[in-house]
Amino acid sequence: MTDSSNTDLWEGLVTSALLGTDRRSPPEAVLPSGREATVALLDAAAVYTVRRRAGLVPVPAAPRPDPAPCDTRPQPPLAARRRLAQLLADRAVPSSGGRRGAAPDLTELLPQWLTKANEHGYQAPPPLLPALLDAARARTDLRPQVLAFAGSRGLWLARFNAEWRFALRGASGGGALLPDATDAGAVAALWEEGLFAERVALLAAVRAQDAGSALALLAGTWSTERAEDRLMFLDSLRAGLSEADEPFLEQALGDRSRNVRATAAELLSALPHSALAGRMAKRAVSCVGPHGSAGVPSIAVAAPRECDAGMQRDGVVPTPPTGRGARSWWLGQLVEAAPLSAWPERFGGRSAREIVALPVADGWSDELHAAWCRAAVRQRDAEWSRALLDSPVTPPESGLGTSSLAERAMLLSILPAAERALWVAEFIAAHGLSEAFQLLGVCAVPWAEPLGRSVVDALDIAREAGSYPWSFSGVMGLAERCLDPGESSRLDLLTATPDEVEGASPGAGSYWSEAFQRLVSTLRLREAMQRELVGTLPG
Amino acid sequence: MAAHSVVVMDEAGVRWTPEQVLALASDAASRTAGNKLGVRGPWSTAGSSDTGAVWGLCKGSGKKPYQTVIDTTGPAYKCSCPSRKFPCKHALGLLLLWTTDEEAVRASAEPDWAEEWLSGRRSQAERGRAGQAQASKTMDPEAARRRAERRAERITAGALELEQRLTDLLRGGLAAAEQSGYGLWEETAARMVDAQAPGLASRVRELGAIPGSGAGWPVRLLEECSLVHLLDSAWMRIERLPEPLAMTVRTRVGLPSAAGSQSIRDRWLVLSQYDSAETKITTRRIWVYGRESEHMALLLSFGAAGRAPQLSLPVGTMVDAELTPHLGAGQLRAELGAQFGIPVPMGSPPPGGPVASALEAYGRALSADPWLDSWPATLAEVIPVPDGEGWQLADAEGGAALPIASAALSRAGLWRLASLSGGRPITVFGECGPAGVTPLAAWSGDAFETVTLI
């Protein structure tokens, strides 16, 4: 039988089977006399099926994808790869919720593992990439680290799975394979045709090499970019912002999009010598100044009466949020955008600390200090930050500076890490842990001494006072992630279950011992993780 | 779950990977609980020995710590906790610690409390080997023959009934099968269970899943019906078949298959281990390949609902052991006999060929057992290639490819396969057949780490 007659025969069998042998007899060729039609049909179909299967041939190959670019970074050591697999496996199963028990929360250690691995410059093990991308899909806070770790192969892989699209449009650009920043042709081609993430990464790379050509690149296509893309590009100028960017930013003050204008104004105000900063200083200084007799100096505030077109062009938002007075709203924006260097001159050569200590007339104190806080953060001014933070041991409500924890946390983030840790340590020693959570969040990891010790001491005091550990679960969780792993041996003592103290909450002792056990085992685990990444273990 | 099977040697032999340990868990809750205990915190005096034993004391809620011992060669577990899960979370946690923290579980001498149970197990194993041979002799051969005859009669009745069912179906037309629904097939499958022909029953259930399963279902239904008919016909005329084929037919209808008397000692590469859960039973399939014999074998292990099957071999390792192949034409199933020493890393993957060689091997195997729907194959130098909605494994050179079976497209393993390759040639082990290839394990050129895909 030839191939085509075979196929015809099979077609005949299928038609007969589909319609039923009562309606359509099987082909003559399979019907020997005296056999029941259905049996003959099945016999013939069996022969055909087995014959077809035995003669299976490959299908034509589809076009092969371009191979992923070579990742030249080394693989993490074996023990570290296994640890990563363990951390990712924990993510896959939903946590049982409720009581946390004495075992570490592995999912919470994934960000640290990734940060360390990226510091070491390792590449992601390819078989773990899918789980890494899944983890980053579920948790946006993991994305920058995962994408950096995943590198070019991660981006290559993400193209094939719609669930990982975020990797392609993610603002960080991750490990996009970029042309040499000095290769003008390749740069221009990618800038014209690349994905958004690739373009953002390209802009950053070119900017790191040569700020001028990066601005030229941006200016070339600026008018044709979509508003949200213009905003993102502008935002990417934040890194390495310099006086050279001023003309471009000044021109962006006239942009069609309000968000773009606001961002341009914000960036300009962070350049103390920019024309915008000068205009803002002039406006702010006319509203805030020294007052009173020479004996008792104080600060007088005269908030602006209108928000004119010039102010609006410089990024001042005219309409206040509900519940705020328009004039104080405008004042806050002027002071926030004015260079802090304008104030010592305005107040007869006084230092930041002295200016902050001056009494403020007519109840403008909170408004003015809050605006100075925002200015100090925006201009990353450590001296003003110190002045506005005041001493950590002063009760917040009677201090000279700000009493808001959120503002304090922002100001702290401007100070050098060691100074930050010391300030928070003294704050905890003076006021306990109940208000410390936000402040601890801005301290560098691992916590520098004496911060770690003061947190542990405060937890120990809370335990002895007989409170339940879950009142401190936020700080406990932070301590698990941020304490120096070297502290674990000092903590061993605290893991024992003490005898119940009179007046203590019932059962609190054993819960505390469990919480400290979890703390100690998490610290040990972090220590092991770091050691594994260094690769001192065999393998 | 991430799977990255890396094995390391240390003074106490090979340590498993976290995935291999987690595969032992009977359910997701045990996995979570076990993973939480897989760190140093709660453990003390943990250790392992070169005979494959691991032990440790785990601090629980009570005063006295739980004593946990594992014999990884079984694997078998003993724990003083009251859990009825098997293995319990302590055993899983301790194994995880053993895989991830070499300093926490060092090679040392077995403590008394562990040694007692371990030596008990060892002597039991000795006795078991001697006892098995005797047990088969004590059975009454006459009674066994009568039982077998009665069962064969019932199977024949079942096969006749099934033939009638197929005849009715074809007389009325397959088009009507889509309307009649799954209930009718389920009922027929239950009749096959009554007829003590579980092999026929599971084929009938698969037939029931075909109508309405996507384009071309009538063709697939006709193919599968014709193979059921072929099996019925073969059973009815079994006395006229040569013995190896007759044995295969008996196994296919569901009679227990028996191991032969010839065993093969070799260093067996453990290529893949995966479970498939049916309603009442979990079947574990372990593919192994003999380094010297070049023989491929399938080890099966079964677990009742809620229990993981007992046999477990670490994928990516090489086990020096005796295997006894089952009888029957075209059968790869074997029983694991004595193991010599503990598993070591496998080194290089088994030798492989282009995609056409996998189909040729399947075709050859069909001549011994026409009911095979796939055959194991190692494909060398292949690239995973996206193809519309699906994927292929394509030869690096030339224009030939195999589609990846649709069931494998929804698994996380597909993405591990693509990621491992990165568009470059790799070695893939899988099951190949008319439905395409189901990839089970892969190796990239730059490292001989076995990446599990299922």
Image: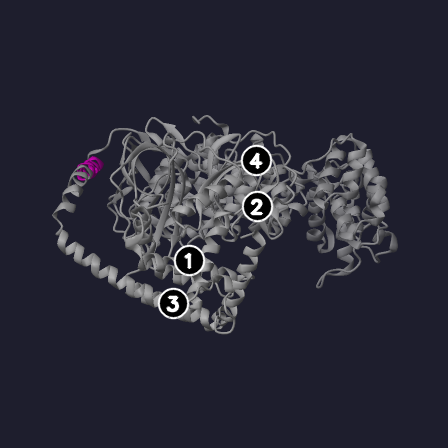
Is the residue marked by circle 4 packed among few (<14), some (14-19), or many (20+) residues within 10 Å? Answer: many
CA gap, disc 1 to disc 4? 37 Å
The residue wearing badge 1 is B227
- Which marked residue is nearer to the observer: mark 1 or mark 4? 1
Which amino acid, by three-letter code, is at mark 1? Leu
Question: In this rendering, does residue A205 appear at all?
Answer: yes
- Which marked residue is nearer to the observer: mark 1 or mark 3? 1
Residue A465 included in the magenta stretch of the image: no
Q: Position of residue A495 (x, y in %)?
A: 35, 41
Give the secondary structure at mark 1.
helix
The residue wearing badge 2 is B392
Between discs 2 and 4, the one toward the N terminus:
2
CA gap, disc 3 to disc 2? 34 Å
Closest to the observer, A306 or B332: B332
What chain does mark 2 sit on?
B
Tell me the quarter of the image containing the C terminus of chain A. top left
Residue B120 included in the magenta stretch of the image: yes
Label 2 in the same subunit as label 4: yes
Residue segment shown in magenta: B113-124
Label 1 in the same subunit as label 4: yes
Between discs 3 and 2, the one toward the N terminus:
3
What chain does mark 4 sit on?
B
CA gap, disc 2 to disc 4? 13 Å
Which amino acid, by three-letter code, is at mark 3? Glu
Quarter of the view holding residue A33: bottom left
Residue B186, disc: 3
Magenta-drawn stretch, dominant element (helix, strand or loop):
helix
Q: Is residue A203 left or right of residue B255?
A: right
CA gap, disc 1 to disc 2? 27 Å
